[in-house]
């Protein structure tokens, strides 16, 4: 997984439209776009828009959630080359505080 994150980060970095802080902010904002696509897929899977009806499946939602995870990991890699260590350390802390009685 982390090799793929690194590969995606390298590719995106080589094709970035903006440098510096602007590029960093835009990379972080990409997460908002992806989360919006999850919401759109959920609305479509449940037929909550009466004008459109059912337009998505729960498999579409799964794919959109995967896009959120990938985008978040690439964003984390954008902030630090130690993305794996940062993520694994944070996950361990969340697991500990959540699962320890």
Image (spheres, rainbow, N blue to C red):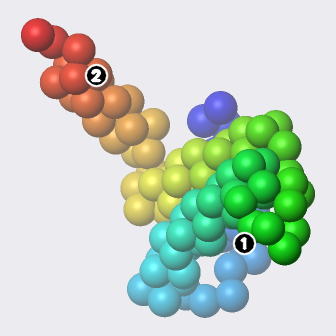
Report the residue marked by disc 1: 14
Cα distance between the residues tagged 1 and 2: 35 Å
The residue at the point 65 percent across, 32 percent down is 1
**Disc 2 secondary structure class:** helix
Task: Please identify the quarter of the rendering in which residue 71 is found.
Answer: bottom right
Dot 1: element: helix
Across and down, in percent, residue 21 comes to 42, 86
Judging depth in this view, the residue of 101 and 57 nearest the camera is: 57
- Residue toward you, 59 or 49: 49
Q: Position of residue 6 (x, y in %)?
A: 63, 47
**Outermost top residue:** 101
Number of numbered discs = 2
**Residue 40 in sight:** yes
Residue 46 vs residue 86, the one in the foreground:
46
- Residue 67 visible, this orientation: no
For mark 2, does the 10 Å Cα neighbourhood hold few (<14), some (14 to 19), or many (20 or more) residues? few
The quadrant holding residue 19 is bottom right
Find disc 2 in the rendering and name its residue.
Answer: 95
User: Residue at position x 41%, y 62% from top?
Assistant: 79
User: What is the number of the mark on residue 62?
Assistant: none
Looking at the image, tell me whether mark 1 or mark 2 is earlier in sequence order: 1
Q: Quadrant of residue 100?
A: top left
Estimate the x, y position of residue 52 in percent, counting from the top left. Answer: 87, 68
Q: What residue is at 61 percent from the left and 52 percent from the top?
A: 68
Residue in view at x 74 percent, y 49 percent: 46
């Amino acid at each position: 997984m982390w090799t793929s994150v690194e590969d995606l980060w390298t590719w995106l970095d080589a094709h970035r439209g903006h440098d510096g802080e602007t590029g960093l902010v835009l990379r972080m904002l990409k997460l908002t776009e992806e989360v919006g696509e999850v919401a759109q897929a959920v609305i479509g899977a449940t037929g909550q828009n009466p004008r459109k009806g059912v337009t998505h499946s729960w498999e579409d939602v799964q794919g959109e959630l995967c896009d959120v995870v990938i985008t978040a990991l690439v964003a984390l890699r954008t902030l630090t080359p130690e993305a794996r260590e940062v993520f694994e350390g944070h996950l361990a802390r969340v697991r500990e505080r959540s699962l320890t009685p």
